[in-house]
Image (tube, helix red, strand yellow):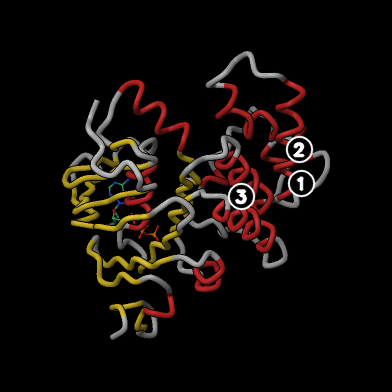
Amino acid sequence: MVRTTDPEAAVLCDDLSVARGSAGMRVVDGVSFRLAPGEAIAVMGATGSGKSSLAAALAGTEPRDVRMVGGVAEVAGIPLRARGRARRIRTYRTGHLAQGANSALQSQLTVADIVAEPITTRDRKVNQRALDLRIADLLDELHLPIGAAARYPYELSSGMRQRVAIARSLVLDPAVLIADEPYANLDVDVRPAVRDALVRRRDDGMAIVAVTNERELVTDLGAAVLVLRAGHTIGIGPSIDDMQWTPDEATSIAG
Ligand SMILES: Nc1ncnc2c1ncn2[C@@H]1O[C@H](COP(=O)(O)OP(=O)(O)OP(=O)(O)O)[C@@H](O)[C@H]1O
């Protein structure tokens, strides 16, 4: 088992570097931040700056071509480099909304099965009635219609699929949520339901790493801000109000 340097942190990155693809190109270089339970950080930056690669590395699951190549990273008290049982525990404690998750839902499963899968793959003897209630509550919280549970992804709009993917990422009550573009494909009228679901859990101690360039979401989450350019940190600050902005990106912390 790999030793944890900061067991109290929800997420710790110290000089973290991440490589991607068969050529092992370094796409995140020397990123450092610490998140306590109940805190949020927004990873911002232009397209290709490394936001999704950082999120995927911290989620530690998919895609498999993303890997840590330097520094320290710990999520939910367990190092990213840990293997075996420690790695499995870290996976259960981490919710992951991957980039494009709404278009990657398994087409042969119903919404209920998709959302339940993180639980059913872990515990095959789970009480079905309790599970059904839990999923109905989650779908309702995210303003999905009654009956959505029995439907298949191809029967849903992209905004509904996005909320199914969010429900799945929350179903295990994770200690840490890694959410890549939580508002992707969401109409403005359903965004408050997603925002409230995230803020409520953050208030209950869930830490959130959100890849987003949506300033309103960053403010609503009370998130710290990390801005990347070409894999490097070009700005980090405790809130979006502390950042200095050019027309299209934050460049540094104020002052
Ligand atoms: N599958 C892949 N194989 C190799 N390189 C990749 C792959 N996906 C992305 N990259 C490269 O990794 C770098 C970082 O991409 P990444 O998707 O993490 O950035 P991003 O900031 O999330 O961008 P976007 O907002 O467009 O999703 C870019 O140079 C990109 O071209």
Mark found first going from the N terminus, 3 or 1: 1
Could you tell me residue 155's position as x and y percent?
A: 73, 41
Toward the right, the furthest residue is: 146
Toward the top, the furthest residue is: 125
**Dots 1 and 2: beta carbons under 8 Å?**
yes
Could you tell me residue 173's position as x and y percent?
A: 57, 39
Residue at 45 percent of width and 57 percent of height: 39
Mark 3: few/some/many CA within 10 Å (<14, 14-19, 20+): many
The quadrant of the rendering that contains the N terminus is top left
Frontmost residue, 25 versus 137: 137
Left or right: residue 53 compared with residue 131: left
Give the SS element for disc 3: helix
Kind of residue sitting beneath label 1: Asp
Frontmost residue, 172 versus 186: 172
Could you tell me residue 48's position as x and y percent?
A: 32, 61
Kind of residue sitting beneath label 2: Ala
Q: Residue beneath label 2, please?
A: 136
Q: Nearer the viewer, mark 3 or mark 2?
A: 2
Numbered tag placed on residue 162 in the rendering: 3
3D distance between C-alphas at marks 3 and 2: 16 Å
Mark 1: few/some/many CA within 10 Å (<14, 14-19, 20+): some
Numbered tag placed on residue 140 in the rendering: 1
Left or right: residue 197 compared with residue 221: right
